Amino acid sequence: MKLHLNKPLPKAVLAKMSATEHKKFATLQKKSDDLGEEMDEAQRIASVAMRKEDQSGHTGKPSASVQRLINLGFKKEFFAFKAADSLRSFKDNMRTKYL
């Protein structure tokens, strides 16, 4: 099957979708957007903390607080990608169902 990365659904598909499918689509889209923003923020904070630690002359392994921020960024990334994958699979299912 062809991958449709970030490609919006065609109007023909949107017109044929039921109300529950529209609601699920909107929910998945909102969840994916929100988790993506959370991931960006967490990774931004972690990278700033790493740069500050590097500028202070700290070499080697990151400190425990910076490592926690890095781990939080990866955790947020996992959930954001999972939400994006579920949205992508829903879109692909709607394309195959209505086209």
Image (cartoon, rainbow, N blue to C red):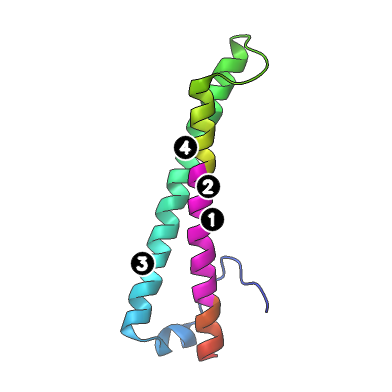
Label pair 2/3, CB-CB below 8 angstroms: no
User: Mark 1 and mark 4: span between their CA atoms?
Assistant: 14 Å
Q: Which of the labelled discs sits on residue 77, or is there none?
A: 2
Residue 3 place in picture, x, y as percent? 65, 72
Q: Are marks 1 and 2 in contact (CB under 8 Å)?
A: yes
Instruction: Work out whether mark 1 precedes mark 3 in sequence or the reverse, and give the earlier one.
Output: 3
* Label 2, label 3: how far apart the Cα atoms are: 19 Å
Residue type, mark 1 in image: Phe
Circles 1 and 4 in contact, beta carbons < 8 Å: no
Instruction: Locate residue 75, reporting x and y percent.
Output: 50, 43
Q: What mark, if any, has residue 42 been given in the picture?
A: 4
Query: On the image, numbered disc 3 is attached to which residue?
Result: 27
The reply to whether the magenta stretch includes residue 14 is no
Classed neighbour count for the residue bearing mark 4: other residues with Cα under 10 Å, few (<14), some (14–19), many (≥20): many
Q: CA distance from mark 1 to mark 3?
A: 16 Å
Look at label 2 and name its amino acid.
Answer: Glu
Q: Secondary structure at mark 4?
A: helix
Query: For residue 81, which numbered disc appears in the image?
Result: 1
Q: Amino acid at mark 3?
A: Thr
Instruction: Identify residue type, mark 4.
Output: Ala
Query: Mark 3 and mark 1 in contact (Cβ < 8 Å)?
Result: no
Secondary structure type for disc 1: helix
Q: Residue at x 35, y 86 (%)?
A: 18
Vertical side of 17 occupied by 67: above or below: above
Pick whichever, 85 or 48, lies toward us.
85
